[in-house]
Every structure is written in structure tokens, then in C-alpha cells.
Image: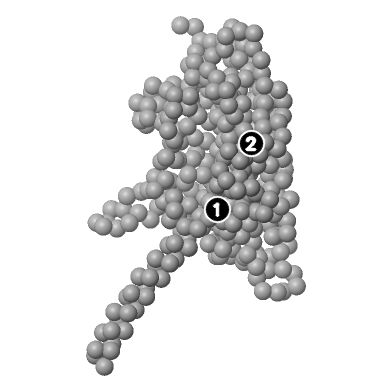
Amino acid sequence: MQTVGAKIKELDAQVNELDAKIKDMLDRLPNIPDDDVVAGGKEHNEVIRVWGQKPEFTFKTKDHVELVTSLGLVDYERGVKLGGRGFWLYKGDGAKLEWALLNYFVEEHLKDGYEFILPPHLLLNQCGYTAGQFPKFEEDVFHLENDEPGAKSTQFLLPTAETALINLHRDETLKEEELPKKYFAFTPCYRKEAGSYRTQERGMIRGHQFHKVEMFQFTLPEQSGAALEELVGKAERLVQGLGLHYRVSKLAAEDCSASMAKTYDIEIWIPSMNEYKEVSSASNGKDYQPRRGNIRFKRKDGKKPEFIHALNASGLATSRLLPAIVEQFQQEDGSVIVPQPLRKWVGKDLLTPQKA
């Protein structure tokens, strides 16, 4: 019997090891794309609509790095001195313009009845798992070191407020009449992998830290399709209010986030780069994240609880908006027109170059 007991213990250990490997493999599988999402990579993305006209200039234009520097809006050198490569700091009118964008977004979301959330910036690893970012993309975030020798980190800096918002109702069962729940949050976003830093992506196009207002909804399964259209429409109205030329693209399956079944990108035009850059991704993850976080709801008829649907959209990220604003609204004398919705916070209609 001692031999049998030892064998059982040995086999149990093998089973536990195999179970852990199977769970890790399953946890890394992405969401199933919607039937109307085409296969393939970003080359198969479909432009759904375009708003406004590309700005045309009768003078030699400057890129956003030149403009924000001459206008005294951003200090790249001191940003690198303080944080290293991939960081910058806003100053003077630049700080006011950045804060005006955030105020504008907050004001609009409050008008639409969304609840304002300011979540922690340090999150437990379970939050990353529920969001679908762990374990597959666990190395893409900044982890906090654990002081205990050999111990694994249990916290990380949030890469997006979505990671916090999906966890608001983790391990909860909501009532049908409570839905939909509509939230938005403001946070800085911390990204370990900030991209290639190509020459054309210098400045604020990519970085390790940027500001974003994130929208989020928990809905009934039959309502998530309409909720996605609502989120896309809200993001578009924000860009339209700023008067910026943009387009909306429906992403192919390979270009969607691993947790999402369908995604639309709102992409603004950056003249100096001669291309569009995403400022909002609106996505329907359906029940992929709620299954990982055990988030359910119960219908009025009292039947068995079902998994809820979860959706998110940037509303909006600022690090590419400011470059688009200064480039699209630049004038021949080097000044930049301030978009009308931001003027009450910036305190002026026109940004002018600083004197040397």
C-alpha cells in the first residue's frame, strides 16, 4: 500500500502539471471573430466611412515635433531626462491643451449618462487575466518587483483603463434590470512595448506613457451589437467636435485584439506622416472577458445565470490627437488654431510661436 500511495502521489503530480499546461494553452487562445469579420491581417481592414476633407496647405508645412517645440507646448529633451526614451512632458499652453482635451471628453461622457470612474493605476495580476492580456501578453506591461526572494510579481501598471473597468464586477452576478452599465475612466496608460520608434513615429505618436479616457459597457448579449455602434458613434462625435479629418476602419480578424470579436478603429490624419493613426478602438468582446472573470447576470424570469457581454472604446487617447490638431490647424506664420470646444479651458483661440 505504501508503494501504491507513492505511485498515486507521483501520478497526481503529473496530472496537475498537465492540467496547468492545458489551462495555459487554453488561456492563450483568442476570442472567436464575428461571422462578418474578414480573415487576414491589417491589409484586409475595410474603410467604412471618411469624415471631412484632408487639409490642403499653400505653404510649406511643419510636422508636430517642430510645431509643439516652437509653440512651447512640449519639452522632449527634459521628458527624456526625467523618464528616458519614450517619454515627454507637456508645459504651459501644451499642458492646458492636453487637460482641455480630457475635460472635453469627460464633459461629453457625463452628458451621455456614463458613470465616471478613477481606478487604481496598480492592478493585481487577476485583472490582467480577466482582461485577456495575461498570460499571452504578460511581458508587455510594467510589473512591480516582489521583495520576497524568488517570489513572482503580483501587481502591474495598468496599460489601459479597460483592464481595470472589466474587473469592476468580477465574480458578481448582476440583475437584468441593472443593465446596461455604462462607465468611463481617465488614467495614464503605461506601455512597456512602445513600438519601433521609426523616424516617422517620433514625438508623441508612440510612447511608454500617455493619457486616455476609456468608455466601457456591460450589456445583455442581445444588446451588445447596438452598444458597439453607440460607442463608435460617441468616439466619432468627439473627433468631429474637434473638426479633425478622420476615417473609420473595420478591422480584419488578425488585426483585432486577442480578446475582441469585432473592432472598429477611428483613425485621424497626420499630414506629415501622410497616413492615418488610430485614436480610438471600439470593440465588442462579447462574453470572452466575462467568462475569465466570472461575470454573469440573471434574467427576470429567474432562469440560470448567463455570462454578460463586455465592450470598450477609447474616448479618446490624447497622444495622437495633439499632433493631429497642431498639424491640421497650423497656419503659415507658425501659429495653430485652437479647436472651438477647447478654448474655454485653454483660454485663447490661437497658439503663437514663442519668441527666441
Snapshot quadrant of residue 192: top left
Q: Position of residue 118 (x, y in %)?
A: 55, 45
Q: Count up the numbered dots.
A: 2
**Residue located at (72% from left, 34% from top):** 49
Residue situated in front as seen by the camera: 345 or 18: 18
The residue located at (61%, 53%) in the rendering is 33
Camera-nearest residue between 312 and 19: 19
Q: What residue sits right under mark 2 in the picture?
A: 266
Q: Is residue 117 visible?
A: no
On the image, numbered disc 1 is attached to which residue? 259
Q: Tell me how far mark 1 sits from mark 2, CA to CA.
A: 19 Å
Rendered view: 282 above or below 209: below
Q: Closer to the camera, 18 or 333? A: 18
Is disc 2 placed on a helix, strand or loop?
Answer: strand
Residue 248 sits in quarter: top right
Residue at 64% across / 8% down in the picture?
A: 58
